[in-house]
Image: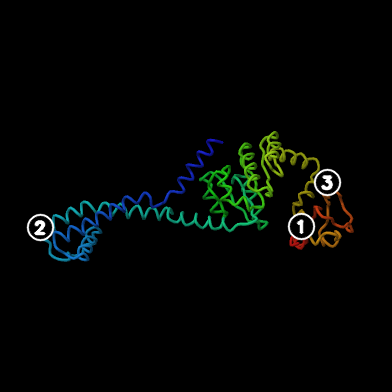
Amino acid sequence: MAQARSAARLVAARRQENPWARLRWLIALTAAVIAYGVAGYMLLERWSFLDALYMTLITLTSVGFEEVRQLDSSGEVFTISLLLMGVSFVVVTLSLIAASVAEGALGERGRRRRMQRRLGAMRDHFIICAYGRVGRTVARELEAEGAAFVVIDILEDLEEQMIEDGVVYLIDDPTSEEVLKTAGVERARGLICAMDSDASNVFVALTARSLNPEIFIVGRSSEASAAERLYRAGADRVVSPYVTSGRHMALLSLRPRVVDYVEVTARDAPALRLEELQVEPDSELVGRTLAEVSGDSTPLAVCRRGGEIVSNPDRQLRLEPGDLLVLLGSSEALRPVEER
């Protein structure tokens, strides 16, 4: 954990660096050389400021124009010194500026400012901590559902991938309270802890829960023993990929058709989805029947506020405050339900 935070501080410091910082001393030195040239021509040749500036600039840039006026021997010696002192600095400065533009260093700052503006405008969004294989899968699913989300990952190597995928992201440490605040955890709808480290996931869940008591947290646990710690830290749901995948493979072997039905992803079958609908106390759904609410979708279960689960409910069952309705249907059949 300490190593991750130290790395995060280094990453943050590197990103906060102004891309012009390495050029400042060269620009300042070039300005000093220009001032030296202007002052020299004005003192030695008694030229006006404009003539002196013009002569200095054409000398430094080596454009090859003729002198403003005929130079005497002292003026020629001074011009030689100006060439020796100045041309190398100007050339180096221009080269570094061109390299910064070519490498995208200057555009990088603009992109990060735009990312900050997008983050500031986000409301009721999801936060994905880590953009590994699990995090990328989560991001694709949220994108398919049209849900807004932001990704936080400490690895700079993933930035190019995130830019290519068009996601809103932060290259920083997800375990940092300030980073979570920057990602909008206090106004977010949900948070997915998808990091490889169980300890990091527990810390993120604990921090996010303290910042936003209402946020829905899904945690990933590599070890079965870490699941309980995640729940104690404030996670609402915990997924163990290794346990889940093993159980899934066993069920596929034993009951393949049942699993296909539950997953509603059977090959060559119509696209079906499971959807849940929470009946709030002040909702217009209170007192209405399942037939009126579900429409063309199929109600699979109603979870009562007290914990009772009504499986395969009668379509004339009336909904009560606090009920959670689980429906199965196509995207078209579920769309009216989702809009309620």
Residue 228 % position (x, y): 71, 36
Tell me residue 131's x, y (percent): 59, 46
Identified at 56% across, 56% down, the residue is 120
* Dot label at residue 270: 1
Give the Cα distance between marks 3 and 2: 100 Å
For numbered disc 2, what is the local secondary structure?
Answer: helix
Q: Is residue 216 left or right of residue 7?
A: right
Three-letter amino acid code of the residue under disc 1: Pro
Q: Nearer the viewer, residue 194 or 284?
A: 284
Q: Which mark is residue 70?
A: none
Secondary structure found at label 3: loop
Q: Can you say whether 244 is above or below 267 in the image?
A: above
Lower sequence index among marks 1 and 3: 1
Q: Name the residue nearer the viewer: 80 or 286.
A: 286
Q: In the rendered structure, which amino acid carries the disc numbered 2?
A: Ser
Residue that mark 3 sits on: 307
Q: Label 2: few (<14), some or many (≥20) within 10 Å?
A: few
Badge 1: how crowded within 10 Å, few (<14), some, or many (20+)? few
Q: Which residue is mark 2?
A: 73
